[in-house]
Amino acid sequence: MPDHERQAGQFEHLRPRMLALAYPLLGSFDEAEEAVRKAWARLARINPAEVTDLAAWLTVVTSRVCLDLLGARPGQAGQEGLRLPDAVVEAEASGEPGRSAPVGLALLVALDALAPAERVAFVLQDLVRLHVDQVATVLERTTADTRRLAEQARRRVQEAREADGEGSPAVRRRLVDAFCAAVLDGDPAALAAALEPEAALHADGWHPLRGAQQVAQRAVTLCQGGPAFTAVLVNGSPGALVTRDGVPTAVLGFAVRAGRISRVQFLLDPRRLAAIDVDALPRW
C-alpha cells in the first residue's frame, strides 16, 4: 500500500480523537470539523516519511488550527446577547447517566470568555492532560509563558468549575425533574426553591442573569406555551430537551452543587436545535 494511502487510513482512525480534541477548544461542532479538515489538508501536502508520530503531529496541528479559528472570531462587543456553545445531546440510557462525560456546558460557557491562547493552554493542560512542554510547542511560546497562561485561565474559570461540584447523577436528575415540573406548572417560587440564591442563567440571545428569582422568572418565560420535556444527557450530565408538537425549542443544561442548581443553560438556536433527532430520544 502506498505511504499516502496508509497515512490516510491512519488519519481516519484518529479522526474521532481529533474531533474530541477540537470540540472543547472551540465549543462548536462545525468549527471542530473545519479544524480537522484543515489538519488533514496540511498532512496531505507533506511527505509521509516526515511524520514519525501521526497522533502527536495531528494533535499539534489541529490545536494550532483551533487557535487560529479562535483568533479569527469576532469580538463579543455589540452583540445582542450570548451564543451558547454547541451541546452534546444524548439519550439517557438506564443505569448509565454521564457515561460519555464530555466537557460540561457551564465550563464551555466560561471558556468562551478566555483569550484564545489562554483557552488552548487550559484545555490542553487541564482537560486533555498534555504535558506543559507539548502545549508550549502548540502555542510556540516558552514553557514559563505557557504555565502562566494556563494559570490565568484556571483563575478565570474557577467559579464555573466550582459551581458544578455535585457528582451524583441521581441527585442531578432529581433536581432537573423538579425544575422541569415547576416550569410546567408555571411556578417561579417552586423553581427558585431548587436554585442556589446566586444561581445564574445563560441563554442564546439573552444577557446572563444571576439570582434565583430572576432565573426562575426567565425560565418560565422561555418555556411558555405548553412544552413537553424529554430527559436527556447534555454534555454527559442530566438535562432536558424541550419540544412543542415534536419540534425541539430548547436544550437545558444544568450545573449542580450541594443539592441545588447553580447554573442553567438554555440553548435556543433554531438551526442547531433542528439537528437533534427527537425520534431517537425516549419520552418522559
Image: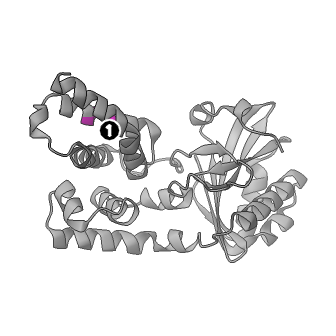
218 left or right, relative to 48: right
> Within the magenta stretch, is there residue 36?
yes
> What colour-coding does the image apply?
one colour
User: What's the magenta region?
Assistant: 35-39
Q: Quadrant of residue 214?
A: bottom right
Residue sticking out furthest to the front: 1
190 left or right, relative to 113: right
What amino acid is labelled 1 in the image? Ala
Q: Quadrant of residue 213?
A: bottom right
> Within the magenta stretch, is there residue 108?
no
Q: How many marks?
A: 1
Tell me if residue 211 comes above or below residue 274 in the rendering.
below
State the SS at label 1: helix
Q: Residue at x 17, y 57 (%)?
A: 137
Q: Residue at x 74, y 43 (%)?
A: 242
Residues packed near mark 1 inside 10 Å, few (<14), some (14 to 19) or many (20 plus)? many
Q: Nearer the viewer, residue 64 or 69?
A: 64
Quick one: quadrant of the N terminus? top left
Q: Nearer the viewer, residue 113 or 103?
A: 103
Name the residue carrying label 1. Answer: 35
The percent coordinates of residue 11 (x first, y second) are: 30, 34
The percent coordinates of residue 166 (x first, y second) are: 64, 71
Q: Residue at x 30, y 55 (%)?
A: 116
